[in-house]
Image (cartoon, rainbow, N blue to C red):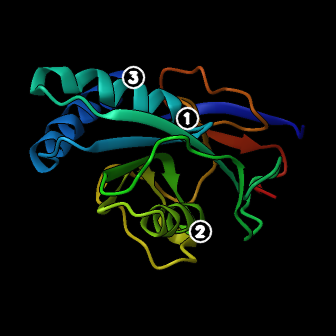
Amino acid sequence: MRTHHVRDVLFTSEQIQQRVRALIHEIAGSCETENLVMIGVLRGGFIFLADLVRGFAEYNLHPRIDFITLSSYGSGTESGGTVRICHDTDEDLRGADVVIVDDILDSGRTLAFAKELFLKRGARSVRTCVLLDKKANRAAKIEADYTGFPVDDVFVVGYGLDYDNRYRELPYIAKVTFENGKME
């Protein structure tokens, strides 16, 4: 692991929780369905998904929950361009209204891949919910249906996001600064 520092907090725990509550309200208001499936993209989206679905009870919304593990990064800081399924979903998606929950929309390849995959599997609709939207490096033509925060072209960790599988536990989102100043 390269020498780096986690210093600049971009979004505090309080800001994240306030935005998550707003997203719960937004999703609940537009997902009036008995066949809602929330699919978290592992590993980065697990904390975000957990906080979202815990808030659904007050709206009497009871989705089925599943996970998929997709990879396009490996241990680097930039997408390699090819998306692969590491762990697949188990839920039957035929006729379901699916919301994919991911930590960050960056190149867009992972989210576009998942959306197309679930539509091919018979989902009635597929929407996307991301905590962070980083538009600078968008390679795929996709926009999130629900977004937590826009973020500049910086490498971030915390609240599920990681650098080399570390820092996911941080209750805030912070910028990673590398010693040479570059994300490689």
Image coords of residue 53 (percent x, y):
31, 28
The crowding category of the residue bearing disc 1, from other C-alpha atoms within 10 Å (few below 14, some 14 to 19, many at least 20), is many
Q: Is residue 78 left or right of residue 173?
A: right
Question: Which residue was labeled with disc 1?
Answer: 174
Q: Is residue 11 in view?
A: no
Q: Secondary structure at mark 3?
A: helix
Residue hosting label 3: 13
- Tag 2 secondary structure: helix
Inspect the image, locate mark 2, and give the three-letter code of the amino acid beneath it.
Arg
Which element type, helix, strand or loop, lies under badge 1?
strand
Q: Is residue 103 above or below residue 137?
A: above
Say few, some or many: other residues with alpha carbon within 10 Å of mark 3 (under 14 / 14 to 19 / 20 or more).
some
| Res 137 visible | yes
Q: CA distance from mark 2 to mark 3?
A: 28 Å
Is there CB contact under 8 Å for labels 2 and 3? no
Disc 1/disc 3 C-alpha distance (Å): 11 Å
Looking at the picture, which amino acid does disc 1 mark?
Ala
Q: Residue at x 27, y 43 (%)?
A: 36
Image position of 150 (left or right of 35)? right
Q: Position of residue 162 (x, y in %)?
A: 67, 36
- Between the residue at mark 1 and the residue at mark 2, the CA separation in whole angstroms equals 23 Å
Eye-nearest disc, 1 or 2: 2
Q: Which mark is residue 109?
A: 2
Residue drawn 58% across and 77% down?
139
